[in-house]
Amino acid sequence: MPRPRADALRNRERIVSAAREMFVEFGSQVPLDEIARRAGVGNATVYRHFADRTELVREVVCSVMDRISAAAERSIAEEPDAFQALRGFVNTAADERIGALCPMLSDTFDRNDPDLLAARQRLERLVEELMERARESGQLRDGVAVGDLMVALSQLTRPLPGTACLDIDRFVHRHLQLFMDGLQAPARSELPGTAATLEDLRRHG
């Protein structure tokens, strides 16, 4: 008898969750059998859900972006203070280890895949809305664009795979708070250069 669909969905979720954890710790080339072991499923189950590594990486990237987008939507709906909503989103995105996705987005799989493109556009739209609300409230300094936020968030949450530096996690929220304090108006300095837009990131990514 085939397993119930709910059971298959739970297995898929366990695989994606385990893959996300191991990609953060060791990079996206971690053996799939190690991911299966951490997920508590057999190798065949992994390949039943994902034809190859590329498909699994894409699913992890989309899953993380969807979770971060959901957090952004909650911040917009539940937090009346626009800058606190932005701050809450940034810390939630850090917990999801969004910086670990950047090397995978630079890999060879199709970044214009429809699912990936939809997840990315949803996230970008929500981050723009969070920043615009903070700007309109007078709490976000001038000369800052979405790309600036995403670059800093990526850099501050990017791990060093396969090293003993995972302990750096304990500094992430501390350093993010320093960064977010620097985004608040009134600004204490004039920023050099020009603001980084999402188009800049796509062009040079």
Image: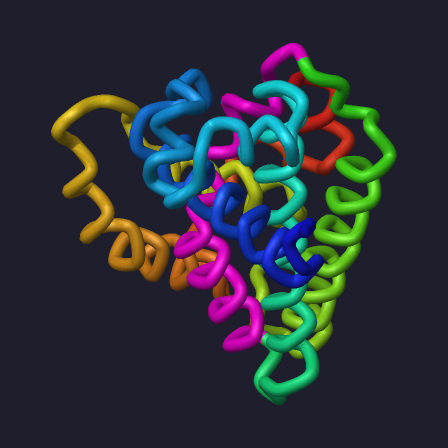
Judge from the rendering whether residue 81 lies leftward or rightward of residue 90; answer left or right: right
Question: Which residue ends up furthest to the right in the rendered image?
Answer: 114
Judge from the rendering whether residue 151 lies leftward or rightward of residue 4; answer left or right: left
Classify residue 161 by image quadrant: top left
| Picture coordinates of residue 5, whole percent (x, y) | 70, 58
| Picture coordinates of residue 86, whole percent (x, y) | 56, 67
Q: Is residue 121 above or below residue 49?
A: below
Q: Is residue 168 above or below residue 126?
A: above
| Picture coordinates of residue 15, whole percent (x, y) | 50, 42
Residue 142 appears in the figure:
no
Judge from the rendering whether residue 80 lies leftward or rightward of residue 160; answer left or right: right
Which residue is painted at 62% across and 19% down in the image?
A: 52
Residue 147 appears in the figure:
yes
**Residue 85 covered by magenta stretch:** yes
* Front residue (pair 194, 201): 201
What secondary structure is the stretch in magenta mostly built from?
helix
Classify residue 53 by image quadrant: top right
Q: Quadrant of the C terminus?
A: top right
Which residue is painted at 68% across and 51% down in the image?
A: 1
Which residue is painted at 43% across and 60% down in the image?
A: 180
What segment carries the magenta color? Answer: 83-108
